[in-house]
Image (cartoon, rainbow, N blue to C red):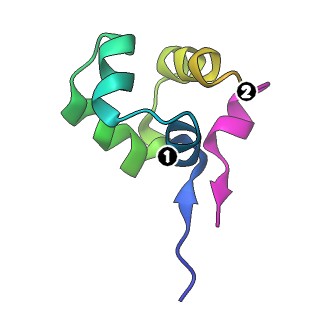
């Protein structure tokens, strides 16, 4: 079975960060951040920009890609 996850989750794990770590850095709740990981299409442009900066990716499109 093919398990896909979005790049936000992958980038967080690659950087050895918990959801709580990311949420605290962004100044949001862990629950809200978890929802963003599960439903990345609901991320606002401002939040996507903050995540892009945090994870040091070149574009918002790269941030929202699905990975296997």
Drawn side of residue 7 relative to residue 31, left or right = right
Residue pushed farthest front?
Answer: 16
Residue drawn at 64 percent across, 67 percent down: 68
Counting the numbered discs, the total is: 2
Disc 1, SS: helix
Q: Is residue 63 rendered to the left or right of residue 51?
A: right
Q: Locate residue 9 relative to residue 31 in the image: left or right.
A: right
Is 65 contained in the magenta span? yes
Residue 37: x and y, percent? Answer: 41, 44
| Residue displayed at 60% across by 47% down | 7
Between residues 13 and 41, which one lies in front from this camera angle? 13
The part of the chain drawn in magenta is: 57-68
Residue 40 located within the stretch drawn in magenta: no
Labels 2 and 1 touching (C-beta < 8 A): no
In this view, the residue farthest toward the bottom is 1
Q: CA distance from mark 2 to mark 1?
A: 13 Å
Q: Quadrant of residue 35?
A: top left
The location of residue 65, given as percent across then percent down, is 67, 49
Residue 31 in the figure: left or right of residue 8: left
* Residue sitting at x 23%, y 30%: 30
Element assignment for label 2: loop
Q: Quadrant of residue 59?
A: top right
Q: Which residue is mark 1?
A: 9
**Residue position for label 2:** 57
- At horizontal 30% and vertical 10% (from top left) the residue drawn is 27
Identify the mark nearer the N-term, 2 or 1.
1
């Amino acid at each position: 079975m093919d398990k896909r996850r979005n790049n936000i989750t992958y980038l967080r794990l690659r950087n050895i960060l918990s959801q709580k770590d990311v949420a605290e850095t962004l100044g949001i709740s862990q629950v809200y951040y978890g929802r963003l990981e599960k439903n990345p299409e609901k991320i606002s442009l401002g939040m996507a920009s903050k995540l892009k900066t945090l994870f040091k990716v070149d574009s918002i499109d790269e941030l929202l890609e699905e990975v296997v």
